[in-house]
Amino acid sequence: MSHVSTPRRTDSDTPSGRGGRGRKRGRAKGRRTGRKVLIALAVVVVAAGGTAYWLYSGLDGNINGVDIDKAIGEDRPEKLPTSGQNVLILGSDSRAGDNAELNTGKVAGARSDTALVMHIPEGRSEAVAVSIPRDTLVTRPDCTKADGSSMASAERVMFNSIYSQAGPACVVKTVEKMSGVRMDHYVEIDFAGFKDLVDAIGGVTVTVDQDIHDPSSGLDLAAGTHKLNGTESLQFVRTRHGVGDGSDLGRIGLQQEFMMALLSEIKKQDLLGSPTKTYKIADTLTAALTTDSELASLTALADFGRSLNGVDPSTMETIMLPVAYDKTDPNRVVPAEPQASTLWKAIRGDQEIPESAKKSPATGGS
């Protein structure tokens, strides 16, 4: 069971805030986010290896693959000088398909709500995740969209908008350009894809400490513990108007807490004792994944997952990209220098990140 503390508005809930309580909460959320990503990958590996491989071989087609190398071309940073790996992980919020049943806004397509650069140093015994704030203003390079059309470069583009404008390959290219760090892999997890997964595992139990009434998503929960079905879970991760100050901060917080509750429920399942149920869970889970073409198979995911066996999620460090408030628009942030450059330089060399590179002027800390 996961306990969800409904976010309350503080001055630090917006980029222009300076409150200390919000800074601590942001750091804690960042650490939890990084752990969820590793656990999510581990769940895929367990589902792939829990019973005979033949049972799962037909699921390869579920995983969407994006040919990042073809879309970006040769204009990319050098790979790490060691056996370390860098993975760009996005949590997307699709508005397509089954999600049209919820009155949660008129945004078409999908948005990338969460972005993490996960760096796994040589030895694969630890990891660090760099969270890129969604409101960061960046220079978007020229990109080739999924339909083959070109998009010219643009300055002062909000990072969160690139996914919907030009697709995942352009997000990878943008991160590589701003950091100088080569992304070895790309993993995207669609929140909407978990609707069927929740029904497959029999529901997800959450606890909220305040009433949530959101006429937009249709969610109506009294404070306390509830077991949500698939549709209710989708309403839960979409809710924003009934939480805190109604901003995206509250919605993203609910999404993160729901992920932990969902993964806890999966962990409780008797995957080995029920091949049929395991297949159904694996089927719905893989349908929610998009990866680079190299990882777009159960065999490749399992191999990659096994390479991370030495990483302990409880010791993984998650930091936020150092940012400063934009001088023109205080509701946006920009990478802070020299901290951001120092951080990316350490990752490029597969070296320990200096404490000075974790200081963010916009929050007063890491």
Image: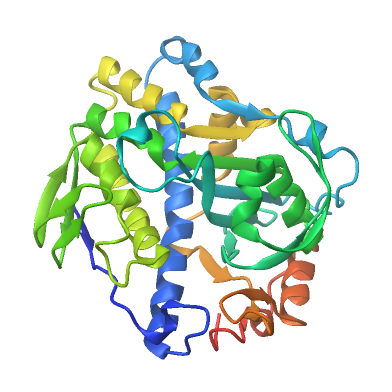
Task: Tell which of 71 and 303 is nearer to you.
Answer: 71
Question: In the shown orientation, is residue 210 left or right of residue 336?
Answer: left
337 left or right, relative to 253: right
Residue at image x 43%, y 43%? 40
Residue closer to the observer: 173 or 105: 105
229 sits to left or right of 43: left
- Residue 245 left/right relative to 248: left
Q: Residue furthest right?
A: 74
* Residue lying at 13% horizontally and 63% vertically, measured from the top left: 211
Q: Is residue 258 above or below residue 271?
A: below
Q: Could one spot residue 209 in this view of the protein?
A: yes
Please state the horizontal and vertical placement of residue 3, each as a whole percent of the image.
21, 61
Q: How many marks?
A: 0
**Image x and y of residue 307, in percent:** 59, 41
User: Which residue lies most toward the front here?
Assistant: 106
Q: Position of residue 110 (x, y in %)?
A: 52, 42
In which quarter of the view is residue 233 placed? Answer: top left
Q: For the C terminus, which image quadrant?
A: bottom right
Q: Where is 88 relative to 336, above or below? A: above
Instruction: Indicate the position of residue 284 as horizontal and vertical percent values.
Output: 37, 26
Q: Is residue 270 visible?
A: no
Instruction: Decide: is 46 above or below 183.
Output: above
> Residue at the spot x=15%, y=67% of the render?
209
Q: Quadrant of residue 314?
A: bottom left
Question: Residue 19 sits in which quadrant?
Answer: bottom left
For this rendering, which residue is in front, 67 or 316? 67
Q: Height in image: 329 above or below 107? A: below
